[in-house]
Image (cartoon, rainbow, N blue to C red):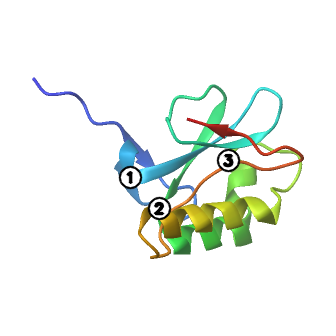
Amino acid sequence: MGKRLIRRSCVACKREGDKRDFFRIARGEDGSVIFDKTGRAKGRGAYLCRREECVELASRKKVLEVALKLDRPIDPSFYEILRDELRRAEGGRADVAQDPLGSRLRQEG
C-alpha cells in the first residue's frame, strides 16, 4: 500500500491538490507570519497555490489574514517576498512564493 497523499486547498482560489503543490503560510505562537518551506512549522497554517494570480488574490482579498485569524493586516512586503520566490523557483517565471512578515521577518525551513 502506497503512502497516502495529503490533499489541501488554496485559500485564494479554492483549488484542491497535493500538499506539495502549495506554499504553506503559518502564524507562529508569537503571532508572526512565516513562509513555511518545510510544511511542518508549528502554528495555524494556510495553503496558497504557487501561482502569481493566487498571491495577488490573497493580497487583495485579505484571505490569509482571515485563514490565519490575524488581528492585523499582513505587510505588503510579505507578498513581494512571495512573488520573488515564485520568480526564483520558476527560473524567472512569476509563479511561486516565500518568507514571513510583520515587524519581524522569519523563515522556517
Which mark is in front, 3 or 2? 2
> Contact (CB < 8 A) between labels 2 and 1?
yes
Q: Residue at x 78, y 63 (%)?
A: 77
Numbered badge on residue 79: none
* Front residue of 69 and 30: 30
Q: Mark 1 — residue?
A: 21
Q: Residue at x 42, y 60 (%)?
A: 15
The residue type indicated by label 3 comes to Ala
Residue 29 picture location, percent across and down? 77, 26
The residue type indicated by label 1 comes to Asp
Residue 75 picture location, percent across and down? 83, 59
Question: Quick one: label 2, few (<14), some, or many (20+) residues within 10 Å?
Answer: many
SS assignment at label 3? helix
CA gap between label 2 and label 1 equals: 7 Å
Q: Mark 2 — residue?
A: 50
- On screen, residue 97 above or below 80: above
Instruction: Please give left or right for residue 85 compared with residue 69 in the image.
Output: left
SS assignment at label 1? helix
Question: Quick one: label 1, few (<14), some, or many (20+) residues within 10 Å?
Answer: some
The residue type indicated by label 2 comes to Arg
Q: Mark 3 — residue?
A: 67
Residue 4 picture location, percent across and down? 24, 30
Instruction: Please give left or right for residue 92 compared with residue 46 in the image.
Output: left
**Lower position in the chain sequence, tag 3 or tag 2:** 2
- On screen, residue 89 above or below 17: below
SS assignment at label 2? loop
Instruction: Please give left or right for residue 20 compared with residue 59 in the image.
Output: left
